[in-house]
Amino acid sequence: MLSTIERRLSATLRDARRTAARRFFVDRQTGLWRSELAWLGVRSRDHARVTAVLEETPDTRTLVLEPPRGWVPHRPGQWTRVEIELAGVRTSRCYSLSSAPHDPELRITVKRVANGRVSGRLHTLRVGDALRISPAEGQFVLPTHPVRLLLLSGGSGITPMRSMWRALLQSDAADVVIVHHARTRADVIFAAELEALATRRGFRVVVRLDDEHARPGEGGFDVGALRTAVPDLEEREVFVCGPPAMMRRVEAMGLPRLHVERFAAMPRPAADPDATEVLVTLGGHASPGGRTIAARTDGALLDQLEAAGERPASGCRMGLCRTCSCLKRSGTVRHAISGAISDAPDEIIQLCVSVPCTDVELGPIVQHAVHAAPDERASERTLDPREKLARRSAQKVDPR
Amino acid sequence: MDTQSIETSGRFDPANGAVTSVVTSDATRDVTRSPMSPTTELRPAHGKSSRRLSRDEADALGRELDAIRAEVLADLGERDVAHIRAVMKAAGAASIAGRTLLHFGIDPVTFVLGTSALGLAKILENMEIGHNVMHGQYDWTGDPALRGDTYEWDIVCPGDDWRSSHNYEHHTFTNILGKDRDIGYQFLRVADEQPWELRHLAQPVTALALAVFFEWGVGMHDLRVAETTRGEQSLAELGRRSGPFLAKAGWQIAKDYVVFPLLAGPNAPRVLAGNVLANVARNLWTFSVIFCGHFPEGVRVYSEEETKDESRGEWYVRQINGSANLEGSRWMHLMTGHLSHQIEHHLFPDLPAARYPEIAPRVREICERYGQVYATGSLPTQLADVAKRIVRLSWPRRAKRAPSAAVA
Ligand SMILES: Cc1cc2nc3c(=O)[nH]c(=O)nc-3n(C[C@H](O)[C@H](O)[C@H](O)COP(=O)(O)OP(=O)(O)OC[C@H]3O[C@@H](n4cnc5c(N)ncnc54)[C@H](O)[C@@H]3O)c2cc1C
Ligand code: FES
């Protein structure tokens, strides 16, 4: 009881301090200098610092990070949104944390994707560089009670698995099978660790290489081989993360306890010749009065808003992370993956997987940023009067 | 869906332009336009006047401007972010240096230096940073520190009031009499078309007072005090509008006139004086820049009727004819927040202002080709022009010097 009051009080004081700081030392200066100081090595709440760069395979590197100040330990399997600036534009991507929660440092392991904007830039980082990361998120996490597990991965999909097996090493009741697929021996990420792991009690490691094991022309993952390697498959809690083709085949097996994590963005819905044009109205837009853009009925709202110059916050871009969640005031949208229809007013939708079917009116859109600093969030409350203006002026006839 | 209510902001989008410009046929428009009332006649600008453009010509001009806009948008990048951050850091450093000199110095030299540095910081913050960031010019970066819709600047005017009265009303209804509340800030007569009233006799003095207390004028602008006294706005509404203003003004007064002076202990009077002077210097400067942007001779006002069903191209034409530029050095442009490129700013309010000097020659060339006056002059000439105009218009009839007397 007392502690709640205390907490409230200290929160109020903190808010007051922040407001005062903003008013006395011009608004954004604090945010600006925070980023500057991060590069000078001062720890901050939203910047992690690279303390080591490890070469895992020819195209994969691990960034060892000093966590931001106040970092809440993640759960094994979770990811963080990494944000960097590309040509002046903040751009973020999700990366699974490959370190265990109890490890002293954070790790992300990044595979360089051909022409990849963010992965390419992350590969240029050096010791001492700072990068913004968000608090850990994700539902692809190790169960808290001991169970029999299968960790099934392909390529860079092994990253969340490392976090899990390192957490499992802490407990002595582990019963884990690790099946990992890679193209060649040289492409096996964490190869040495997997080798060491194979000798531990309770761990079994199977590494399958496309160039050595796969039947010619079949390439990659094979359900039959998996069943042979792990006969008690159905009794295990299965965690899978890998290339889309592999994920599809595993999902088709109908396993009872399957957990999936997807890295690669959904294939974009193909352009539909029958698609029509609809109007999407954005509430609480930076320019009072809101903004209306023309959109097509064959593409996700997120892509179309971006094409129109908007910068809605996004993360996974495939309906997982909910970074792009937005209030839909009216109109009908279709879920790009499940096909589910949302036609009721005032429903929360995810922009990245919502395809408009009719004119759509959206609420305020969260702008792109890893996570707004608390003082920014406080000032978002002031959006209200402008929203009112937006509604007022929407009724007026525009002179243009 | 009502096509005309599609885009109600000062923001343009080529995609929308296509939608919004389908309004009325030319035949209907000509009826609403003619006969031209004398008030809508073009005034000569330094001996020249803009050619009347047909809608097709205006739209062609609009397309050329859209192309410039698209080009700049595609080119935005590192350099723009680096520029605004450098200015932010400079303003922050100048403010710290200024306050330090005022607090710890005892001699007149540090007083002058400190006050100047603080004034400089405030000017940079209000003009190049605050005004431009609040226009959303850097929203594309996704950096919360450069976000337009939450920025709060170092002036008594609350950011949200500014965003509605300036970004939306002034930029959408630029120089439309009766709709643009920035014309003479509702109490100065700056255009012949405004009816003369007795109180205008005092306007040379009121204008000077406005210059000195400009931030208060800007801050109270959106309270609509005049409208309330005329009975057009309820007292309750005035009260509602006053809340944010009083809160913001409270913070500003506390900062510059109470807390910082008190922190200086025995140096309090010196700090207070320095802060007052810095604020006044900023007020005079911003007043000058802004009045030169819209009220020198040659800039015209529009009637509500003539802009009723304006196309996107015609909207561009109105922005050109409703604004005037200032000539000067690179530093002068920076100190005005690039509002010295008022024409470019009004055409492209959401492009980073530091880009205006780069596109200005092309905009000017387009204006010349279409016979539109590209009003420009040095700060002293334009300021003198504005002063003359304010004095001249304080009298009911025009001075003999005005050759274009269409209305008497
Ligand atoms: C929850 C989650 C966790 C993730 N964890 C990791 C991780 O631990 N390690 C890691 O390396 N990546 C991880 N990713 C993928 C990562 O977020 C990026 O998608 C990837 O790094 C590519 O980004 P980019 O900016 O370099 O490529 P972009 O510039 O966005 O894309 C360039 C090209 O590569 C293609 N492409 C994009 N992503 C992939 C991909 N994953 N595989 C193949 N082609 C692709 C695109 O279609 C495009 O053609 C994760 C993704 C999610 C959603
Ligand atoms: S971006 Fe992750 S749910 Fe849409």
Image: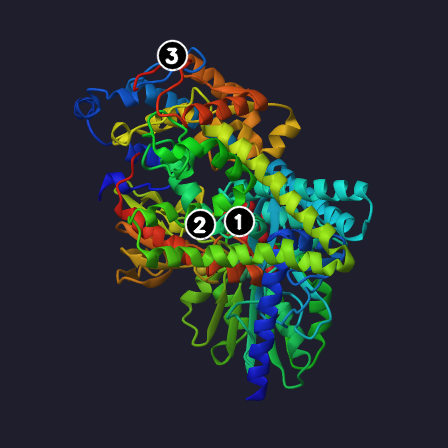
Disc ID at residue A107 = none
> Alpha-carbon distance for marks 1 and 3?
47 Å
Disc 1 target residue: B147
Q: Residue at x 78, y 48 (%)?
A: B101
In the shown orientation, is residue B346 left or right of residue A105? left
Q: Are marks 1 and 2 in contact (CB under 8 Å)?
A: no
Element assignment for label 1: loop
Q: Is residue B331 above or below residue A191?
A: above
Residue A204 as seen in the image, left or right of residue B214: right
The one nearer the camera, B126 or B8, is: B126
Report the residue at 62% width, 73% height from top.
Answer: A164
The image's colour scheme reads rainbow
Foreground: disc 2 or disc 3: 3
Q: Disc 2 is attached to a residue of which chain?
A: B
- The numbered mark, 2 or 3, whose residue comes first in the sequence reads 2
Of labels 1 and 2, the one closer to you: 2
* Image quarter in which the N terminus of chain A is found: bottom right
Q: Amino acid at mark 2?
A: Asp
Residue A379 image point, x, y percent: 51, 59
- Residue B10 visible, this orientation: no
| Residue assigned mark 2 | B161
On whether disc 1 and disc 2 are found on a single subunit, the reply is yes
Picture layout, residue A184 above or below residue B4: below
Residue at image mark 3? B403
